[in-house]
Amino acid sequence: MLQPELKRYTEANRAAWNEVMPKHQLAAKEKWDTLFSQPSYVSLADHEVKLLLQIGLKGKNVAHLCCNNGVELMSLKNLGADTCVGFDISDEAIKEASERATLCGIDCQFVRSDIYEIDAVYSNRFDIVYISAGCLGWMPDLRFLFEKAAALLTKDGVIFIHEIHPFSEMLPFDNSKTSDTLRIIEPYFKEEPYIEKGGLDYVGNSEYDAATTQYWFIHTISNILMGMINNRIRVEHFSEYEIDISAGHHQIETMKAGIPLSFILIGKRIN
Ligand SMILES: C[S@@+](CC[C@H](N)C(=O)[O-])C[C@H]1O[C@@H](n2cnc3c(N)ncnc32)[C@H](O)[C@@H]1O
């Protein structure tokens, strides 16, 4: 059973995501339903698709951790992946993803589960574990996340991470009303989580009085790399980009100020 101190965070985050998902849906559900009704629609950025195709997706079994509304996993399916299973803790996100898969006739399975509690039935089944924008920060224990991810992989399986760069978490978000966008206002090294209420509607940009509290953890690049290495995952690729995938640093991206805003990290299970 999951330790109560981890569960305290992950269940609070589950409630926060269930609270915000109807707002995301109001702003974007129809758009995604229409886009994925087109055959072979892919929502992923070109530089990401290029690397995914280099690894090879055709015939691969893919697990997506923190899959939210399913559009990224459906893109991987449309790029040629075989079995696709998405895991997410939010009941509302999984409901939306499952409904969209049925509506659009895309063969993906969506499972409501805390990443830390994914059933052992999924162990050693996936060629690729995929993690995308805004997953790692919800994880109170990074070492344990990589342990779970590694357990899902077949021998020689690959972890593909396309994430928000932790360096960018030191800078103000676009909505912070500061004129000094490049001022460092937060530490890079931070043990305790940010504790926040609301502010999760980065899709519809509505402000709301949240009934829930969320916990967001900063994981440094070294901790992410060591999380892989300590779980016998060999780092095979690492690249950094001035592209904002957080929906909060568009101003910095536009300035082209030389700030790392996102990264792609790929590793292979070595036993
Ligand atoms: C920012 S969203 C991911 C967004 C996705 N990359 C996209 O762009 O649509 C983060 C997701 O992580 C999920 N999540 C947070 N903590 C989780 C946990 N412990 N286990 C599984 N999913 C979790 C949330 O429910 C939410 O759907």
Image (cartoon, rainbow, N blue to C red):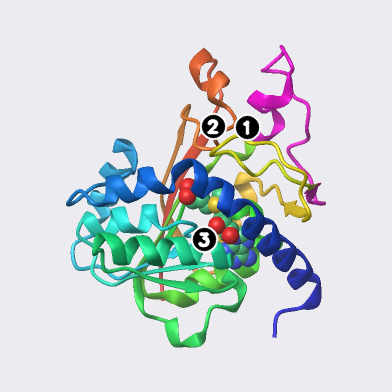
* Image quarter (top left, top right, bottom left or bottom right) of the C terminus: bottom left
Q: Nearer the viewer, mark 2 or mark 3?
A: 3
Work out whether 199 lies above or below 153. above
Residue 181 x %, y %: 67, 17
Q: Is mark 3 within 8 Å of ligand 1?
A: yes
User: In this picture, which residue range is highlighted in magenta?
Assistant: 169-195
Element type at mark 3: helix
Label pair 2/1, CB-CB below 8 angstroms: yes
C-alpha gap between disc 1 and disc 3: 26 Å
Q: Looking at numbered disc 3 in the image, what kind of residue is underneath it? A: Ala
Q: For this rendering, which residue is in front, 36 or 192?
A: 36
Q: Looking at numbered disc 2 in the image, what kind of residue is underneath it? A: Leu
C-alpha gap between disc 2 and disc 3: 25 Å
- Give the residue at mark 3: 93
Work out whether 262 lies above or below 108. above
Q: Earlier in the sequence, mark 2 or mark 1?
A: 1
Work out whether 30 lies above or below 174. below
Magenta segment: does it hold 173? yes
Q: Earlier in the sequence, mark 2 or mark 3?
A: 3
Residue 124 x %, y %: 40, 81
Classify residue 48 by image quadrant. top left
